[in-house]
Amino acid sequence: MNKVILMGRLTRDPDVRYSAGESGTSVARYTLAVDRRFNKRDGEATADFISCVAFGRSAEFAEKYFHQGLKVVVTGRIQTGSYTNRDGNKVYTTDVVVEDQEFAESKAASQANGNNYTPARPEPSAASGDGFMNIPDGIDEELPFN
């Protein structure tokens, strides 16, 4: 069985690219800083830096909502590979292919930790006479129902 569960903070904003071709799949790459359970002998905390790659809708979600410093939980599988670089040397890679990803802390906790990033999002307009809020222009394509 090849199953990985990680909880850590993003070291930088995800790098998202789109593959060429008819189906143009999105690919997001990001690195998680995952604290080790035990500290060094001098009490200093240590972390591992794990490369993650997400595809399709997971990549689009990461592009939209993930940012440097955000604490997330990722489940996936380890994938190894290799390639020959420009110097002719063989390079070995190890990535976690993301199967599921989610926030590991609330927005309030994230902001309390000095992470004040808030994605740009239109403010909903006031409620109409029937008690329902109006949906701002341009947001209807994000709704799961239409």
Image (spheres, rainbow, N blue to C red):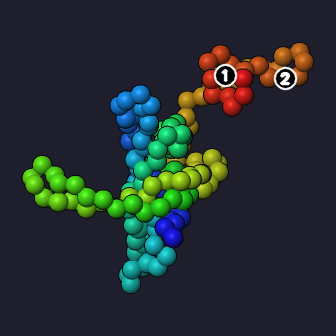
Indicate the quadrant where residue 132 lies: top right
Secondary structure under badge 1? Answer: helix
The residue shown at (82%, 20%) is: 127
> Are dots 2 and 1 in contact, CB under 8 Å?
no
> What amino acid is labelled 1 in the image?
Asp
> What amino acid is labelled 2 in the image?
Phe
Does residue 54 appear left or right of residue 17 in this picture?
A: right
The disc label shown at residue 132, or none: 2
The residue shown at (51%, 50%) is: 70
Q: Residues within 10 Å of mark 2 (few under 14, many from 20)?
A: few
The disc label shown at residue 140, or none: 1
The tag earlier along the polypeptide, 2 or 1, is 2
**Residue 113 visible here:** no
Q: Name the residue nearer the viewer: 23 or 101.
A: 23
- In the picture, the quarter occupied by the C terminus is top right
The residue shown at (40%, 47%) is: 29
